[in-house]
Amino acid sequence: MQVIKKAYQIGLLAIISFFGSLSTLSLLKPTPAFSTTQVLAQTPDPRKAEADRLFQQANQQQLANQMEAAIQSLQKALTLYREINDRQGEGSTLLSLGSAYFSLGNYAKALEYNQQRLDLMQKISDRQGEASALGMLSNIYSILGNKAKTLEYQLQSLAITRTLGDRKQEGFALQSLGGTYTVLGDAAKAIDAYQQNLAIAQEFQDPLQTDLALSGLSMAYVNQGNYTKALEYAQQRLALIRKSSARQQEGNALLALSNIYQALGDATKAMEYRQQSLELDQKMDNSFGESTNLFIQANSYESQGNYAKSIQLYQQSLELVRKMGNSVQEGYILNALGRSLFLSGNLAQAKETLLSAIQIEESQRRGLDDSNQVSFFDNQVKSYDTLQQVLVAQNQPEAALEISERSRARAFVELLAKRLSGNSATPPTIAPLTIKQLKKIAQDQKATLVEYSLIGRNLELFTWVVKPTGEVGFHRTNLIEFLGTSSIEDLVTSSRQSIGARGRGLAVVAKVDGASQPQGTSQTQQLQQLHKLLIEPIAELLPKDPSAHVIFVPQGALFLVPFAALQDTSGQYLIEKHTILTSPAIQVLDLTHQQRQRIPGSATQKLVVGNPTMPMIGTPPQQLPSLPGAEKEALEIAKLLDTKALIGNQATKTAILAQLPLAGVIHLATHGLLDDFKGLGVPGAIALAPSGADNGLLRADEILNLKLSAELVVLSACDTGQGKITGDGVIGLSRSLISAGVPSVMVSLWSIPDAPTAFLMSEFYRNWQHHPDKGQALRLAILATMKQNPNPVNWAAFTLIGESD
């Protein structure tokens, strides 16, 4: 229990920062952009008068927290404003609709209406309205955890306000930007933005903006570890509030001071200010402030092990936010309450509470696009982690597996299901799988499924083994005892480095007796330690037949594990015992199986690409190095597949894009890149030859939108199995290809030497021609390569994702 407690001691300063951002957003509720009485006097059109009345009615309904009624009024008003081409009324209504849906936690609709407002402002060249719309969108992306979009829109909004010379709006934009830099951990940039914000606020003698700037500066200095400066600005803030009429912010200022004193180790002063804050919020009927205060006090008691008190205070906080209708805070508090109930030993109530938290969180993700679902889920993963712990403590490991599956690759699963349904307008509802369905997938795949769940990052490792017979095995490992002061990321990184796998172009190896050997670190020791953690506890549950499939479902840093190279105490590699595949989730296997069934038999064309004329990348632009080994590989494989390889200037992006949808097998031997070239949250690109209008880079986000019919894509390039590791799996090239319709994708986990790769690939295709099982063909190719090139860096990088048949 002490181990569990350690992982969940949340920093009080981080919590107040989270609720502080919600508090700031609550200040941004839209107000009418025009006077309805003036408009009524000027406009005889009855539709205009009715639209204005509905808009005013909606504002009153929003103030009364009647959001559903307000939305109905606003929808009617929006229709009328559009009928009479009233752009001002349309823009104000879109803003109010976005705000109403945000209050309900419907972020998909909030984004939709605020995006419509941005499009409208740009269409009518209303630059001030455009800056405002960008600011509102950035606030929503901030809540969704989409840091890239948040920063992008804030910088755009700031640039427009500066172009317009609107100093006051510039101050608002700088204040938001400071908050984002704080979240990103860039304290220096945060402080710079808040200092500029403070100067503008003081110039206009704006007490609210001055308060927010001082609050932001204090938080930024806390993140920098400069508590003296943090205290200085927090005290300035409190003094300013007490001189002004904005007393409602006083409770928040007192709470911030209490947390700084807590960080400084002065528990007496921390409790004194916290109590003052609570009493003031109660006196002023500030439900938001009171709820936040109760939450933070509850968290403090939880960290001390006083669970009875923490549960009581969490419940009080929860009651207040439910009265306010704040679903964002409700989900967050339910998660914390469920954790406290679990730590107190009240497992039944913890389970129900955490399920309620998950239901709220899943409803908030509904309707969001792929990238926003991924980023938002990463903010909500704790509920699933704690619920798995609760179910394991109740001796229900199979139910815990259901929650583990429910917590991974959800956006990916929905994306795949949407593509398979062929109905983009009405995407199918994908229910989480039951244990019966999970067992059925293992049976259909004729494979042993091994799913890993990292609980609390470095707290525990849960491992499930689902056999084709329906038998389910379970093992739990205390990672703190196993790793000591190290982390799972450290172990995976050191294991990769021990074999010379150091990322694109960074493999550090030395030639010893004709074989590549790592310099320094003990390779055997590292690989055996990973084997001891991941394989040894479940070894007896794995199949004895080497041709039987074992499909690993990793999580987090485990996506980078070279499973084929893991070594037991006798020195035998895992690939020598088993045929290995991987998948981001068990449910994804079910969907790739459906994809395989739909592959048309007419797609018989083979597309083989090797060593294109390389594009320029970077600043200043530099041409990627040529890959003569990849060219030889492509020519050899083209012979095996009875086709012609595209090399050099023939392998243009334009030519490849034209052939991709027609090919049944695709082999790309070129450079793979990990960068997110468009800032879209989908990193990765394949280097092809430039042709006129393009730069030669086939990006992962472009692949995502293709419709492919290939049964197999082989990315014989560096790092193609890597990408952005999220709660939804690895976001990158492999995910994009599977989403585009490919059931089987072969990728690499590091920079790979030319000669062994060419040999391995040729062996793979020769084996595949005689054995229709891709997994077995890859295993035999690896074993053959191993004989000639013993070091795992030469053969363990490639992994097959998805279907083997």
Image: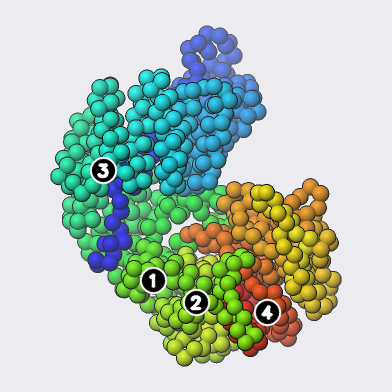
Q: Residue at position x 18%, y 36% from top?
A: 276
Query: As rendered, which of 657 and 233 lies closer to the eye?
Result: 233
Q: Which residue is mark 4?
A: 756
Earlier sequence position, callout 3 versus callout 1: 3
Q: Which residue is mark 1?
A: 461
Q: Residue at position x 35%, y 75% from top?
A: 482
Up-down relation of residue 102 to residue 696 (above or below):
above
Q: Neighbour class for label 1 at 10 Å: few (<14), some, many (≥20)? A: many
Query: As rendered, which of 567 and 320 lies closer to the eye?
Result: 567
Residues at marks 2 and 4, CA–CA distance in whole angstroms: 22 Å
Q: Residue furthest top?
A: 41
Amino acid type of disc 1? Leu
Query: As rendered, which of 643 and 316 lies closer to the eye?
Result: 643
Q: Which mark is residue 260?
A: 3
Residues at marks 2 and 1, CA–CA distance in whole angstroms: 29 Å
Amino acid type of disc 4? Pro
Residue 102 drawn at (x, y percent): 45, 38
Q: From where the camera sits, is residue 347 visible?
A: yes
Q: Neighbour class for label 4 at 10 Å: few (<14), some, many (≥20)? A: some
Q: Which residue is mark 2?
A: 520
Identify the secondary structure beneath mark 1. strand
Up-down relation of residue 150 to residue 381 (above or below):
above
Tag nearer the camera, 2 or 1 = 2
Earlier sequence position, callout 4 versus callout 3: 3
